[in-house]
Structures are given as C-alpha cells and as structure tokens.
Image: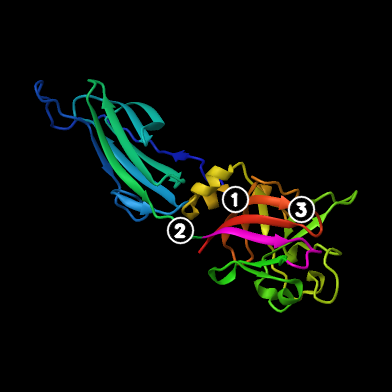
Amino acid sequence: MKRNAFFIGFALFTSFLFNACTKDEGNPVLPSITLSQDAGYIFENTTAAYGDTLRFGITVNSNGSDLLKRAEIFINGQQVADTNLNVNVFEASYYSIKGIADAEEWSFKATDAAGNSFTQTITITANFGAIDEYVTVLLGAQDNVATQSFLSLSNNAATRYMQAEAFQHQADIDMFCYYENTASHPNMMTLASPGANVTGIFTGATSPDNYTTKNLTWFVQTQLTAVQFDAVKNDAIVLDAYNPADQFKKAKVLTAGDVYAFMLQNGKYGLLKVIAVSGEATGTLEIAIKVQK
C-alpha cells in the first residue's frame, strides 16, 4: 500500500487592497497565517492513521504594507512546497497522506517583501494499529509427517494443522507450506493458500483441492531487511510494504532473510520473515509473523 506520494492542489487569489495597518520600524508587523476550520480540514494538533488524507486550507495575509513574496510548507523540517508570490492575500489547499512517521511536524511559513516572516506549526501524531507478533512458526512441507503444513491466523492466533485437521477447519486456513521443483514449476519451498488453486501437491480426500471454502492470501516480496522486520511495532510499515501492483498468490523460492507482506482473505495485512529453510518435500520452513489485530 505505497501511499507516500505528496499531492498539492492550490488556488491563488490576489488582493492589492491595503489594510489600515502601519509598520513600526522597531517592531515590524508580520504577515499572518490562518488555517481553515471547515469540515475535513486540519487546523490544530491532531492524530491520524497511516494512509489518512491530511487536508489543510491556508490563508496568508500581508501586513498591509509589504506584499507577500513566498509561502512554504515543511514536514519535519523538509520543504515540500515553495510558492513565489507578489500579492497581499494568498489562499491555498494542500493535501497529503499520513506516512509511517510516528509524528509529523507541519510548518507553514510566509515571508514578505521586507523580509518579515511568520511560521505556524502543528503536529500530526500517529494513531497506528496494533499487531499480533509470532516470533517463530514452524511449518512442514507436504510430505513431512511430523510437522504441520497448514496455518490459520484467525482469532488472533497462529494455529497450525496437519492435513486431515486442516480439512475440518477450511474457513480458517490462510496458508500452507509445500516444496515443488519441476521443470515447469521450480518453486522450491513455497507458501500459498487454498484459494491459489495449487493442485497435485497434497493428495487424498483431505487435500486443499477438495476444499469447499478456499481462502486466498496474496503475497508481496518486500525490500525490508530482517532487522527492519524485527523493529516493526505497529501496522504502519505493514501497510506501507504491501504494494498491490506486485502481489502474487505464492511466495516461492523462500530463503532465509526474505520478508514478505501479505493480505489475508479477511482483509488483514501482515508481514512474514523467513528464518530458516531446511530440506525439500519432507523439510521445514521457519518463519516469524506480524499481522494486524
């Protein structure tokens, strides 16, 4: 869900009528900034979740003597907008999307022809969602008779099932582990879900081929490192890491250190880190998982 793009829309209105203000050389009159309090606009310190739209309506007025020359916007000290002016009044609407930072300090700065400037600052504090963390989840490939191959992340738990047990809990199964290395499918150790329509791997009456309820989980390979995965404490990076343009029904050729984002059938997002891969069809896959509560 890459939504870090910054979009600015603005409408410029000018007024060359001077106010009755006069300038005291020893105590200059500064330009002023007013933030709209209309519905949907931010005008004071507030909180926001990842992906929320941040909308600001800004009116800048000159001191009545010196024309406005510049309007700037900064986020955490980094300039994101810079408009050259030659007016008495400037009105604009600015739009952005809440990113992964725990706090964003927004500063709106106006400068006039005399070099006088005024800055108004508000802080957007993150209101990110909680996650469940599973430090280690061990899954077996399809021919492993000792380690469960099927995983459910329902009910705020990571529950593993053997094939026969999983058939009795079809509505809860979100992933299964298998090994495949053929000329047409060199997938090696892989994670998929019943809805991915993977056939011919598990056999018998209780194989996912015969499910009547087939949950689909989507996977996105990320550029996150194992260290970055370990540092995740809320759902902001989880959501940010999921790019629908790169989603696949399988996470294949799994290798220690890989980090995948995933989306479950129920709409929850998560991250998984590959800890270890061992063996082939009788082998195991060890992963860590962080998923939205």
Tell how many labels: 3
In the displayed structure, does residue 291 sit left or right of residue 246? left
| Residue 73 percent coordinates (x, y) | 36, 34
Amino acid on which disc 2 is placed? Gly
Disc nearer the start of the sequence (2/3) = 2
Residue situated in front as seen by the camera: 81 or 88: 81
Whether residue 51 can be seen here: no
| Residue 4 percent coordinates (x, y) | 51, 42
2 drawn magenta:
no
Q: Secondary structure at mark 3?
A: strand
Please rate how many residues cluster around mark 1, counting C-alpha atoms within 10 Å: few if below 14, some from 14 to 19, many from 20.
Answer: many
Name which residue lies at 32% across and 33% down. 14
Whether residue 102 can be seen here: yes
Q: Secondary structure at mark 2?
A: loop
Task: Residue under label 3, please give it.
Answer: 189
Amino acid on which disc 3 is placed? Met
Which residue of the protein is positioned furthest toward the bottom in this rendering?
168
Q: Residue 129's mark? A: 2
Disc nearer the start of the sequence (1/2) = 2
Q: Residues at badges 1 and 3 in contact (C-beta under 8 Å)?
A: no
- The answer to whether residue 283 is above or below residue 145 is above
Task: Residue under label 1, please give it.
Answer: 242
The Cα–Cα distance between marks 1 and 3, rounded to whole angstroms, is 22 Å
Magenta-highlighted residues: 133-146
The Cα–Cα distance between marks 1 and 2, rounded to whole angstroms, is 15 Å
